[in-house]
Image (cartoon, rainbow, N blue to C red):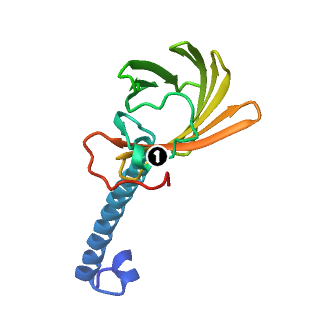
């Protein structure tokens, strides 16, 4: 008497040994697919972290920056141009700068949406900042013997060795423009010719 063939044998069209092999292969395939799904889910979850990390590094101005006066366009800019700026960035951007006379001045830009109010010399400043992609836009109302507005756009070079500051100064109907290029202290990057 012939034994009945299993459903697996009937579906595969082969004998019990081959059907068993197909069943094991199918089980292994299911395990591999489940492992692949978990791995893919994990890798997909890492993508936003890598993008956020890259975005954060594009927005992190921390470091000590030295003015590259030869490659800056500052003849039309009035006010103090700092020879060095040390930046610490956490919940705000804290700047310590050195004036042409060698004096140290400090101020902080808030990154929480509130205005930053500070005083440098005889002038009081009120700055508002916002991000535009990787660029930091800083609008500062300056009050002192003369009142004016300074509009800065800060960006970093791709290799993060250069801080570019595009600046507009508004005094009533008059507008002056220029840019400042700072090199990261200790970097040996090629000198810049634009704010790119």
- Side (left or right) of 45 relative to 184: right
Q: Quadrant of the N terminus?
A: bottom left
- Vertical placement of residue 68 versus 21, above or below: above
- Side (left or right) of 74 relative to 171: left
- Vertical placement of residue 123 versus 148, above or below: above
Label tally? 1
Q: Can the viewer see residue 114?
A: no
Residue shown at 43% from the left, 50% from the top:
71
Which of 95 and 169 lies nearest the eye of the viewer? 169
- Vertical placement of residue 179 versus 28, above or below: above
Examine the image and state in which quarter residue 126 appears.
top right
- Side (left or right) of 174 relative to 130: right
- Residue 39 x %, y %: 34, 56
Residue shown at 35% from the left, 37% from the top:
66
Residue shown at 69% from the left, 38% from the top:
175
At mark 1, the secondary structure is loop
- Vertical placement of residue 183 versus 173, above or below: below
Residue extending farthest to the right is 173
Q: Can the viewer see residue 79?
A: yes
- Residue 112 x %, y %: 55, 24
- Residue 180 x %, y %: 48, 42
Which of 176 and 22 lies nearest the eye of the viewer? 176
Residue extending farthest to the left is 17
Give neighbour class at mark 1: few <14, some 14-19, many 20+ (Cα, 10 Å): many
Identify the residue position indicated by label 1 in the image.
72
- Residue 161 x %, y %: 34, 47
Examine the image and state in which quarter residue 49 appears.
top left
Residue shown at 26% from the left, 75% from the top:
20
């Amino acid at each position: 008497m012939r034994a009945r063939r299993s459903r697996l044998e009937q579906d595969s069209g082969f004998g019990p040994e081959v059907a068993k092999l197909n069943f094991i292969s199918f089980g292994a395939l299911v395990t591999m697919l489940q492992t692949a799904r978990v791995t893919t889910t994990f890798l997909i979850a890492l993508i936003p972290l890598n993008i956020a990390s890259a975005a954060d590094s594009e927005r992190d101005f921390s470091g000590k920056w030295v003015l590259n006066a030869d490659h800056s366009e500052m003849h039309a800019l009035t006010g103090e141009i700092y020879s060095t700026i040390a930046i610490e960035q956490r919940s705000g951007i804290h700047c310590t700068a050195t004036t042409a006379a060698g004096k140290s001045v400090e101020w902080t830009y808030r990154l929480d949406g509130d205005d930053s109010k500070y005083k440098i010399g005889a002038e009081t400043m009120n700055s508002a900042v916002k991000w535009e992609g990787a660029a930091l836009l800083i609008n500062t109302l300056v009050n002192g013997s003369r009142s004016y507005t300074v509009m800065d756009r800060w960006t970093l070079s791709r290799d993060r060795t250069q801080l570019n500051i595009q600046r507009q100064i508004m005094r009533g109907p008059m507008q002056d423009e220029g840019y400042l290029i700072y090199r990261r202290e200790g970097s040996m990057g090629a000198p810049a010719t634009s704010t790119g």
